[in-house]
Image: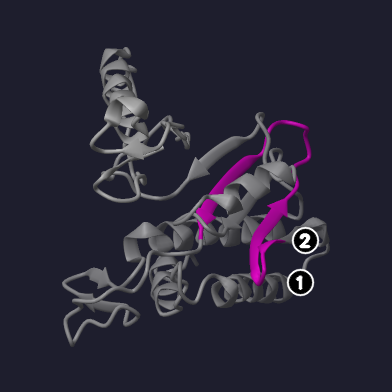
């Protein structure tokens, strides 16, 4: 009998675990998921499931990626579900009767930090893994194509968990990868990705009453900002992803109002 409410209940359990980043981080939720998988393997207790592999990789102190792999009988590319375990900070402004870790259900909707981003999707991916384990045990053989679930850290910060999974060889260019984080409720076939740039402009210090003796690094950076904005507007739009965008998230410079900044 199929447990149709498993993913729903699991989402509630995941939301009740604080995995905020920065904050509690992912240690408790990673142990929770690993214990759940190990318990289900013990319950099914089928020799074919001995081939299932559970791997952990400490990306940052106390913060581990988790991967569970059901190997396939062929060398075809695996299907890989990748999900992050962290959430943004718990934040303020929650209603008194809907705490951020309460996993309160009202009118068939679940409320709590990370319910959408992305513990609901994480629960669905875990449910797919559990269903695969149950099917393998029932049929007594591994699937033709391998299946992996990767639970990553640090998505809400610098994406170091995903980068570590790639560097460790957990996922390569051949795999079929599905990220179960919702995007407008639609299936997305590609992702823009992002590139971080840090630009430093060097000038020459001078007193503001004789600016011609210096070179204003702040003014030069303003020119760069304007130039980059024009360059990005001129880039062609992608059929699936739309136009490229650029954001200037932080800028620093200068000493005093009366000094030409270098």
Residue ID at (66%, 49%): 164
Kindly indicate the quadrant of the structure image that contains residue 206.
top left
On the image, which quarter does residue 5 sit in? bottom left
Dot 1: element: loop
Q: Residues within 10 Å of mark 2 (few under 14, many from 20)?
A: many
The residue lying toward the viewer, choosing from 53 and 29, is 29
Badge 2 is on which residue? 49
Is residue 60 magenta-colored?
yes
Q: Residue at x 28, y 30 (%)?
A: 211
Please give the residue where the numbered disc 1 appears in the rendered image: 45
Q: Are marks 2 and 1 in contact (CB under 8 Å)?
A: yes
Type of secondary structure dominating the magenta stretch: strand
Quick check: can you spot residue 262?
A: yes
Q: Is residue 97 left or right of residue 47?
A: left
**Left or right: 214 as drawn, with respect to 79:** left
The stretch in magenta equals 58-84
User: Toward which corner of the image does residue 107 lie, by quadrant?
Assistant: bottom left
Label 2 and label 1: CA atoms lie apart by 7 Å
Is residue 243 shown in magenta? no
Side of 156 relative to 38 (left or right): left
**Residue 35 position (above or below residue 138):** below
What residue do we see at 56% from left, 60% from top?
153
> Which of 170/91 is in front?
91
Q: Nearer the viewer, residue 255 or 249?
A: 255
Q: Which mark is residue 224?
A: none
- Circle 1 residues within 10 Å: few <14, some 14–19, many ≥20: few
């Amino acid at each position: 009998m199929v447990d149709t409410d498993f993913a729903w209940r699991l989402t509630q359990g995941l939301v009740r675990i604080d995995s905020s980043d920065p904050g509690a981080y992912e240690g408790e939720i990673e142990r929770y998921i690993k214990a759940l998988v190990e318990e289900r393997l013990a319950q099914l207790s089928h020799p074919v499931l001995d081939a299932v592999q559970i791997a952990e990789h400490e990306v940052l102190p106390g913060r581990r990626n988790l991967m569970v792999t059901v190997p396939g009988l062929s060398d075809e590319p695996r299907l890989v579900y990748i999900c992050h375990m962290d959430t943004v900070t718990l934040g303020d402004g929650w209603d008194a009767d809907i705490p951020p870790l309460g996993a309160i259900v009202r009118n068939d909707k679940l409320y709590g930090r990370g319910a959408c981003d992305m513990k609901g999707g994480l629960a669905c991916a875990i449910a797919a893994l559990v269903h695969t384990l149950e099917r393998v045990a029932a049929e007594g053989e591994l699937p033709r194509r391998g299946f992996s679930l990767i639970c990553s850290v640090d998505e809400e910060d610098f994406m170091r968990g995903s980068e570590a999974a790639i560097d460790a060889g957990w996922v390569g260019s051949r795999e079929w990868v599905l990220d179960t984080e919702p995007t407008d409720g639609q299936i997305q076939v590609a992702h823009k990705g992002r590139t971080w740039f840090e630009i430093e402009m060097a000038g020459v210090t001078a007193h503001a009453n004789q600016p011609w003796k210096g070179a204003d690094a702040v003014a030069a950076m303003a020119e760069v900002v304007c130039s980059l904005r024009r360059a990005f507007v001129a880039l062609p739009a992608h059929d699936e992803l739309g136009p490229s965008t650029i954001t200037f998230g932080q800028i620093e410079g200068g000493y005093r109002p009366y000094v030409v900044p270098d």
